[in-house]
Image (tube, helix red, strand yellow):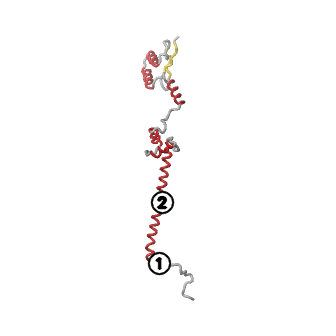
């Protein structure tokens, strides 16, 4: 038999048989390839971050009510360099007259007017506290009637008297007319 190995492929070379200069440059090629992949990943991340920032800015303009399709809206968006929040964009747009200051709807104004007219004769909370403390400090029926008369003259007429005290969350006098 022969002394040669039949499985030997003449095209394959062992690592030890490659020239030494090729083996020394392999680590450098690998390092350069890794560096290039890192640069590409960094560029992709920067592009994604820029896209995210642009989307946040556009959303702030839309939430502020800026029409980005109009020439004025485009010009404002291009020139604006402030805080990219909807409130800041809205304030700047109002300052430049691009959008009007928020107006209150007519229905809401009417509701405020109804509320104001309904509470026009009512005493303020501080006044109520004063009246309640005067009633609490009253030592006689006449003192309670005088305190109630201060709240409103229509509340107590001259023919009323305190019939009994009701116990609840607060002391309150129940008045009944005299016969």
Answer few, some or many: residues within 10 Å of disc 1's Cα (few below 14, many 20 plus, some between 14 and 19): few
Observer-nearest residue: 7 or 110? 110
Numbered circles on residues, count: 2
> Residue 72 location, x and y as percent?
49, 42
In depth, the one of 151 and 100 nearer the eye is: 100
Which of 160 and 121 lies nearest the eye of the viewer?
121
Secondary structure at numbered mark 2:
helix
Across and down, in percent, residue 71 comes to: 50, 43
Name the residue located 48 percent from the left edge and 12 percent from the top edge.
Answer: 158
Q: How far apart are marks 2 and 1 (CA)?
A: 33 Å
- Looking at the image, residue 3 lies above or below residue 103: below
Furthest residue in direction top, as rendered: 179
Q: Is mark 1 on a helix, strand or loop?
A: loop
Query: What number is the disc on residue 100?
Result: none
Whether tag 2 and tag 1 are in contact, CB under 8 A, the answer is no
Image x and y of residue 133, in percent: 43, 23
Mark 2 sits on what residue? Answer: 41
Compared to 61, does 173 lie above or below?
A: above
Measured as percent of width and height from the top left, residue 121 is found at 48, 21
The image quarter in which residue 88 lies: top left
Q: Give the position of the N terminus as an image quadrant.
A: bottom right
Q: Residue at x 48, y 42 (%)?
A: 86
| Residue neighbourhood size for the residue with mark 2, other residues' Cα within 10 Å, grouped as few (<14), some (14–19), many (≥20) | few
Relative depth, front residue between 43 and 178: 43
Q: Is residue 10 above or below residue 39?
A: below
* First along the sequence among labels 2 and 1: 1
Residue placed under numbered mark 1 in the picture: 18
Q: Is residue 169 above or below residue 39?
A: above
- Extreme front residue here? 71
């Amino acid at each position: 038999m022969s002394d040669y190995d039949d499985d030997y492929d003449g095209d394959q070379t062992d690592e030890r048989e490659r020239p030494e200069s090729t083996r020394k440059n392999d680590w450098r090629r690998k390092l350069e390839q890794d560096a290039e992949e890192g640069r590409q990943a960094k560029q992709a991340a920067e592009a994604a971050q820029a896209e995210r920032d642009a989307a946040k800015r556009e959303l702030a303009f839309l939430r502020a009510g800026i029409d980005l399709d109009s020439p004025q809206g485009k010009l404002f968006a291009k020139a604006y360099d402030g805080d990219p929040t909807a409130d800041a964009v809205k304030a700047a747009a109002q300052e430049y007259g691009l959008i009007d200051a928020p107006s209150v709807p007519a229905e809401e104004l009417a509701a405020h007017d109804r509320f104001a007219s309904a509470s026009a004769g009512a005493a303020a909370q501080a006044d109520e506290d004063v009246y309640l403390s005067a009633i609490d400090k009253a030592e006689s029926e006449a003192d309670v009637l005088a305190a109630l008369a201060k709240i409103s003259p229509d509340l107590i007429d001259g023919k009323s008297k305190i019939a009994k005290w009701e116990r609840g969350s607060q002391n309150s006098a129940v008045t009944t007319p005299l016969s």
